[in-house]
Image (tube, grey):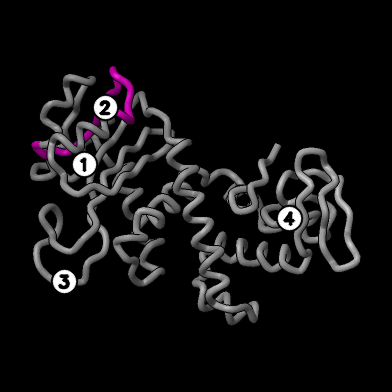
């Protein structure tokens, strides 16, 4: 994070005091006799309990700090199911926001697959059983895009590459055979891990491999994620990485309440 701790959370001060609408960002609000904050801005007009606003912002803060729901439940004295519902709503929204933000990558793009989860012992890497297969594309000095895939076949990977990159992009991959036809889309550089873990200069995939380490470090804290929910957790990691230089807490508030920051 680029901001200090104080600045990160100061964006919520007016929401917590009931001086700003959490739905549209307007300062034209009033407090009702029963403790609600009502927006008087034309086109909004929504209202919400100030007590609930404060509780939900505290939960969003816990999400930002990556606190497990059970621990936050204890700290806030709040029902565990309430916290998991808020967490789930944020992740579902992040999933759609991240997909919309994706766009097409260009310039120099690194690509690789990785395997997440699975407790069964056996083969590691490609061909490992009981794991979530993730394909990732990272634009150097830019954003990363991830997708959970069923297989690492040429057809499946090329369909994603065609959709998510611009023609003329410079691609960096390992020597996996599914990338053999990449030259049709742009210049293709290969890294042979059998000969060298990393080459000098630009011929490497250190960026995307660094992202895999970042993702696994975060997801490890959740101690197991179901296959059904895994894509949403993965998009959360992708979103955190792509907005690592922004105020994530402010973005999460915007995503949860629907408030669009000016």
Q: Is residue 174 magenta?
A: yes
Give the x, y percent position of residue 37: 82, 58
Residue 202 left/right relative to 154: right
What residue does disc 1 label?
198
Instruction: Tell me which label, 1 or 3, sits earlier in the chain.
Output: 3
Looking at the image, residue 255 sits to the left or right of residue 204; the answer is right
Spatial CA span between label 1 and label 3? 30 Å
Image x and y of residue 23, in percent: 71, 48
Q: Residue at x 82, y 54 (%)?
A: 38
The residue pinned by badge 2 equals 162
Give the percent coordinates (x, y) of residue 162. 26, 27
Say what secondary structure mark 1 lies in. loop
Count of numbered tags: 4
Residue carrying label 4: 12
- Name the element at disc 3: loop
**The residue stretch that appears in magenta:** 163-177
Mark 1–mark 4 distance (CA, rounded to whole Å): 44 Å
Q: How many C-alpha atoms fall within 10 Å of the one at disc 2: few (<14), some, or many (≥20)? A: few
Do callouts 3 and 2 mark residues in contact (Cβ within 8 Å)? no
Q: Secondary structure at mark 4?
A: loop
- The residue to which callout 3 is attached is 120
- Mark 3–mark 2 distance (CA, rounded to whole Å): 34 Å
Residue 144 within the magenta-colored segment of the rendering:
no
Q: Quadrant of the C terminus?
A: top right
């Amino acid at each position: 994070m680029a901001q200090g701790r104080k600045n990160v959370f100061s964006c919520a001060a007016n929401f917590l005091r009931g001086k700003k609408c959490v739905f549209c960002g307007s300062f034209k609000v009033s407090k009702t006799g029963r403790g609600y904050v009502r927006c008087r801005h034309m086109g909004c007009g929504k209202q919400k309990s100030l007590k609930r606003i404060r509780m939900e912002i505290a939960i969003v803060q816990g999400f930002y700090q990556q606190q497990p729901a059970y621990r936050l439940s204890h700290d806030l004295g709040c029902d565990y199911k309430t916290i998991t519902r808020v967490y789930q709503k944020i992740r579902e929204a992040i999933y759609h926001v991240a997909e919309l933000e994706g766009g097409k990558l260009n310039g120099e793009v690194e690509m690789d697959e990785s395997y997440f989860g699975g407790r069964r012992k056996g083969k590691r890497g490609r061909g490992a059983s009981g794991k979530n297969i993730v394909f990732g594309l990272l634009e150097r000095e830019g954003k990363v895009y991830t997708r959970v895939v069923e297989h690492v076949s040429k057809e499946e990977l090329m369909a994603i590459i065609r959709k998510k990159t611009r023609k003329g992009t410079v691609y960096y991959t390992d020597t996996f055979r599914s990338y053999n036809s990449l030259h049709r889309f742009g210049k293709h550089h290969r890294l042979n891990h059998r000969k060298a873990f990393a080459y000098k200069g630009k011929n490497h995939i250190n960026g995307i491999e660094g992202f895999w380490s970042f993702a696994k470090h975060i997801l490890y804290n959740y101690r197991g994620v179901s296959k059904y929910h895994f894509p949403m957790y993965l998009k959360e990691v992708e979103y955190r990485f792509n907005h690592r230089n922004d105020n994530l807490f402010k973005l999460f508030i915007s995503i949860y309440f629907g408030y669009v920051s000016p």
